[in-house]
Image (cartoon, rainbow, N blue to C red):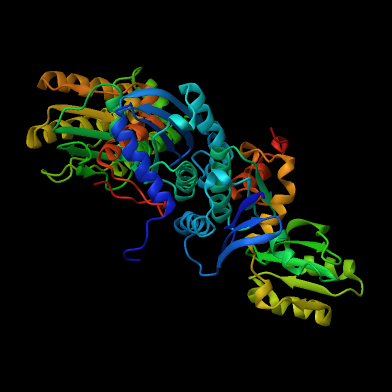
């Protein structure tokens, strides 16, 4: 509809935004994240200071299924959503009167799970007449770093999680260029699959990481460098190689040290991740390297990337563990950039499972 | 005068209404198989503006809590409970089946709303009303094979006429007519879709009961498939925590 009269909601949002701009007071953003199996809500001030970050994890519920069951996750989200948001406000010592905008993850992720957070965010934004901001989940992971240290541009961000493996170049706030991404499994997914083959519990990443530190990378496994210039990743071949190694050993009646196998697997994954990151820094130029996503909790990856960045004289930022996994503080932090630019979502914002970054 | 906002997104129909005790101020209902997530809030905003209602003026919110499409039910419930929580007002859940059955208030036989639940199953229940009185439940809502349900209805109804309602009758009308013959009545198209106005009035009557937003959860009438499978394999854990 062209030239239609703005709705009462749109008028209220504009008024609220202008009043805030004129007041010069700090901006408190309520972040909401429900893209997978964590129901999370957070209050972040001026995109930098975490006032609260509540994460209602469902990990224990999904453990018995050996992975996240989308329908089960969505059901928990709708049960927990207002409770989690209220807890975030209480811990921050704020009420909705103190909140200037709502930022919510609208993709990528599990569609049924995303929709709960998006519906809640829109409802609160409408009820209170305050701006609504749609945030890309990966942008959120990257902005988790801003809760630790100010970002310096240009920068390279390595985002690694159960669902993502991406190398992103940023020349300024809110600008993302994907240099490479996985062509098959995400790194975290490969960890889970290898963990299952080693009969380790779900989620497998932390267990592999622990075993890897007790073993030596003595078993030859492939590195998927792909084409010489590519920044893409591939982990399914590596995963198959691990499974074959186990299978062949058991056929020969030999036993393989799980510690050594974990160490060898982790060595292959981290070498490719780290070396491609360093190469990207050299080609594109970067004043900072950021690590983000759930796999940023992996000690092997942190150590290797720290060492290489040290050798190259590059500042590396790694968020604390609590900000590596899915959380709403990172969503509020990323949302603050849109707030400053006045880029708001409309009430028809939808959950987009395959939302592209950029 | 207390004003209530009501919504139903639990199936293909989207319905939103703003009601007062003795008056339906506005109602918007579409049956277009379009995305509820995209349309619900705009529909609410439009009706609220149309009736000159500010969110702060609402005394409560009514919502169809299921059964129905899992995602559809969640969009409505998440929206209603979050809005109610923000405004610190009660949210009242009304059965999606009952919302359809309310169209038949005044009918003197057995009222049977049903939604298709795939694999020959339906979500359904049976209600009765007399002289415009509120519905009373004759048979609790359930997920059941349509053939079994029709057999049990036949016993329950005796000589009484049974009025079947709901948009999914398109799929099941033949089977019903086959098994129940002339005893089965079918509502005209005007009576098959849920109307948020019914939900709003029902919610208005229950506002005093509280209806805390945190406690508002969907009624799916069945476990998630993965949970059902897991429970079947681990019968000892059948006791809910």
Q: Is residue B235 left or right of residue A126?
A: right
Question: Residue A190: x, y in percent?
Answer: 36, 38
Quadrant hosting residue A288: top left
- Height in image: B57 above or below A335? below
Q: State the count of labels.
A: 0
> Of residues A45 and A31, which is closer to you in this image?
A45
Q: Residue at x 22, y 38 (%)?
A: A167
Question: Residue A318: x, y in percent?
Answer: 27, 23
Q: Residue at x 82, y 82 (%)?
A: B182
- Height in image: B157 above or below A312? below
Q: From this viewpoint, which residue is outermost toward the right?
A: B158
Quadrant hosting residue A162: top left
Residue A116 in sight = yes
- Height in image: A251 above or below B181? above
Q: From this viewpoint, which residue is outermost toward the bottom?
A: B182
> Of residues A325 and B57, which is closer to you in this image?
B57
> Of residues A215 and B84, which is closer to you in this image?
B84
Question: Residue B112: x, y in percent?
Answer: 77, 67
Residue A256 in sight = no
Quadrant hosting residue A24: top left
Which image quarter is the C terminus of chain B in? top right
Question: Residue A347: x, y in percent?
Answer: 42, 52
- Height in image: A147 above or below A121? above
Q: Is residue A228 left or right of residue A50?
A: left
């Amino acid at each position: 509809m062209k030239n239609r009269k703005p709705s009462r909601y749109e008028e209220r949002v504009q008024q609220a935004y202008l009043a805030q701009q004129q007041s010069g007071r700090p901006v408190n953003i309520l972040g909401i994240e429900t893209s997978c199996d964590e129901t999370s809500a957070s209050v972040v001030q001026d995109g930098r200071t975490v006032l609260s970050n509540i994460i209602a994890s469902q990990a224990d519920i999904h453990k018995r299924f050996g992975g996240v069951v989308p329908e089960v996750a969505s059901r928990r989200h709708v049960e927990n959503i207002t409770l989690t948001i209220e807890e975030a406000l209480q811990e921050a010592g704020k009420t909705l009167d103190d909140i200037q905008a709502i930022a919510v993850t609208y993709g990528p992720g599990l569609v049924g799970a995303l929709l709960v957070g998006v519906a809640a965010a829109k409802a609160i934004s409408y009820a209170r007449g305050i701006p609504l901001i749609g945030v890309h989940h990966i942008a959120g992971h990257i902005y988790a770093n801003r809760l630790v240290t100010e970002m310096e541009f240009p920068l390279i961000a390595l985002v690694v999680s159960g669902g993502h493996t991406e190398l992103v170049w940023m020349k300024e706030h809110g600008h993302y260029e994907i240099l490479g991404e996985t062509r098959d499994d995400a790194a975290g997914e490969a960890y889970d699959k290898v963990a299952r083959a080693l009969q380790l519990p779900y989620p497998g990443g932390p267990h592999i990481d622990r075993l890897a530190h007790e073993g030596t990378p003595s078993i030859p496994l492939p590195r998927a460098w792909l084409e010489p210039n590519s920044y893409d990743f591939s982990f399914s071949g590596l995963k198959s190689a691990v499974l074959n190694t186990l299978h062949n050993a058991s056929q020969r009646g030999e036993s393989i040290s799980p510690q050594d196998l974990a160490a060898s697997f982790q060595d292959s994954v981290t070498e490719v991740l780290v070396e491609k990151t360093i190469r990207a820094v050299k080609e594109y130029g970067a004043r900072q390297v950021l690590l983000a996503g759930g796999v940023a909790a992996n000690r092997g990856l942190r150590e290797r990337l720290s060492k290489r960045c040290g050798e190259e004289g590059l500042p590396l930022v790694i968020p604390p563990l609590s900000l590596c996994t899915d959380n709403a503080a990172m969503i509020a932090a990323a949302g603050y950039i849109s707030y400053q630019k006045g880029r708001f979502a409309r009430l028809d914002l939808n959950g987009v499972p395959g939302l592209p970054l950029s | 005068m207390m004003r209530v906002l009501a919504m139903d997104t639990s199936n293909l129909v989207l319905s939103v209404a703003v009601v007062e005790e003795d008056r339906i101020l506005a109602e918007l209902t579409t049956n277009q198989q379009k995305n509820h997530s995209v349309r619900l809030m705009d529909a609410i905003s439009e009706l609220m503006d149309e009736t000159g209602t500010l969110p702060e003026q609402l005394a409560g919110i009514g919502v169809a809590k299921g059964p129905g499409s899992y995602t559809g039910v969640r969009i409505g419930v998440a929206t209603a409970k979050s809005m109610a929580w923000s405004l610190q007002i009660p949210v009242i859940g009304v059965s999606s089946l009952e919302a359809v059955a309310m169209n038949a208030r005044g009918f003197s036989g057995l009222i049977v709303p049903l939604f298709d639940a795939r694999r020959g199953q339906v979500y359904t229940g049976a209600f009765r009303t007399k002289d415009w009185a509120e519905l009373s439940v004759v048979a609790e809502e359930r997920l059941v094979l349509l053939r079994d349900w029709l057999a049990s209805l036949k016993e329950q109804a005796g000589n009484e006429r049974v009025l079947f309602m709901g948009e999914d009758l398109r799929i099941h009308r033949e089977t019903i007519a086959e098994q129940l013959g002339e005893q089965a009545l079918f509502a005209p198209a005007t009576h098959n879709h849920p109307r948020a106005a019914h939900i709003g009035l029902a919610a208005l009557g229950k506002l005093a009961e509280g209806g805390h937003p945190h406690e508002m959860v969907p009624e799916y009438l069945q476990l998630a498939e993965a949970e059902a499978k897991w429970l079947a394999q681990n019968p000892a854990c059948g006791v809910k925590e």
